[in-house]
Every structure is written in structure tokens, then in C-alpha cells.
Image (cartoon, rainbow, N blue to C red):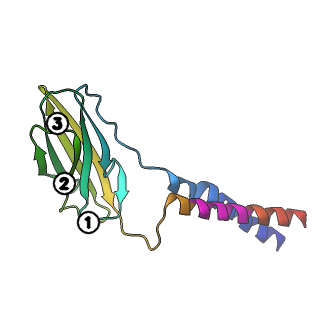
């Protein structure tokens, strides 16, 4: 009986360390360009991210660093259809946040992308961001929630292991 409790406690501890911990890894953001003319920030959806909403509104913030004329276009697509659609453009863009609906992003687990193509001072800049749409979870798996679960499993496993070792 003592051996079974020890194994159970060790499994709970190992679960909290090796299985649940990778869930907390943040999404990796794509490198924004190093252009002297313009920068892109406040990107949604971010590169290699997962979102819970189909037909998302893609957006980004454009910041001009010079007085050059900036034109851009926004394209979307998915990996299986191998198609690209234009969903927005702006000539002589100013500093600001731009929003465009992505109506064709509706399938769960499908990989989608959106691309910003910028023309400024005879220079072309392209940024592409990939994401997937996930099913809405039964309960939200936020980082603080997952930290609580991981901590709970770790504490239960550790206390069980200590109490068994004392007997």
C-alpha cells in the first residue's frame, strides 16, 4: 500500500513538472521589420498563435519614422486551399491601428495566415503571420489558472511523498 501511494505522489509531481508546464509557453511573436521608414506593432493574431474566435478581425499598428508616402495591402489565406485574398489596403497611410475582418477563417485547427505588404520609398516590406483557430474550451486555460493547477498537483504530490516517507 505504501508503495502505491508513493508512486501516485511521484506521478502527480512529475505531471506538474513535465506535462503541464509546457502549456504555459507564450506564443512566439514574429520579428517585425527593421525598416528605417516604418514599423509594425500591436499585431493580432500574432505569429504561430492559436485563437478561439473564427472570422477574427486582424489588426496591426503602423508607425512611420519618416515623411515618405507609405502604401500597404493586407492579404489572407490558408495552408490547405493555397489561395490568397486581398482584404484591405491603404494609400498614403498615416500612423495608426488598422483593422480588417477575416471572414473566410472559419475552420477549426486549420492553419491560416495574414500578410502585410508595405511599399515605402521604393522599398517593399512583407510581414506574414500564421495562426490556428481552436475550439472554445469548457473552462478558460489562462496562465494564472494553469499555474494554480500545476501548483496544486505539485503540492499534493510533494505532501503525499513527504507524509509517506515519514511513516
Magenta stretch mostly in which secondary structure? helix
What is the x, y in percent for residue 59? 25, 50
- The answer, for residue 6, to whether it is visible in the render is yes
For the N terminus, the image quarter is bottom right
Q: What residue is disc 1 on?
A: 107
First-in-chain label (1 vs 2): 2
User: SS at mark 1?
Assistant: loop
Q: Which mark is residue 100?
A: 2
Mark 3 Cα within 10 Å, few/some/many (few <14, many 20+)?
Answer: many
Q: Is residue 10 visible?
A: no
Instruction: Report the residue at 23% width, 63% height from top.
Output: 55
In contact (CB < 8 Å): disc 3 and disc 2: no
> Is 71 on the left-hand or right-hand side of 64?
left
Q: Which residues are magenta?
A: 147-157
Q: Secondary structure at mark 3?
A: strand
Residue position marked by numbered label 3 in the rendering: 118
Residue 121 spot, x, y in % from top left: 13, 26
**Residue 139 image position (x, y, % from top left):** 47, 72
Alpha-carbon span between mark 1 and mark 3: 28 Å
Q: Disc 1 versus disc 2: distance between alpha carbons? A: 18 Å
Q: Is residue 78 above or below residue 36?
A: below
Residue at (38% x, 69% y) in the render: 136
Amino acid at each position: 500500500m505504501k508503495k502505491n501511494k508513493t508512486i501516485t505522489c511521484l506521478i502527480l509531481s512529475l505531471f506538474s513538472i513535465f506535462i503541464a508546464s509546457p502549456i504555459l509557453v507564450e506564443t512566439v511573436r514574429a520579428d517585425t521589420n527593421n525598416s528605417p521608414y516604418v514599423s509594425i506593432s500591436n499585431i493580432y493574431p500574432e505569429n504561430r498563435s492559436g485563437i478561439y474566435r473564427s472570422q477574427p478581425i486582424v489588426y496591426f499598428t503602423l508607425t512611420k519614422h519618416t515623411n515618405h508616402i507609405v502604401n500597404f495591402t493586407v492579404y489572407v489565406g490558408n495552408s490547405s486551399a493555397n489561395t490568397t485574398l486581398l482584404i484591405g489596403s491603404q494609400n498614403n497611410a498615416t500612423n495608426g491601428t488598422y483593422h480588417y475582418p477575416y471572414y473566410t477563417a472559419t475552420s477549426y485547427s486549420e492553419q491560416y495566415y495574414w500578410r502585410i505588404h508595405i511599399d515605402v520609398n521604393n522599398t517593399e516590406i512583407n510581414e506574414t503571420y500564421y495562426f490556428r483557430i481552436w475550439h472554445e474550451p469548457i473552462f478558460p486555460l489562462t496562465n494564472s489558472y494553469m499555474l494554480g493547477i500545476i501548483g496544486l498537483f505539485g503540492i499534493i504530490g510533494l505532501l503525499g511523498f513527504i507524509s509517506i516517507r515519514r511513516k
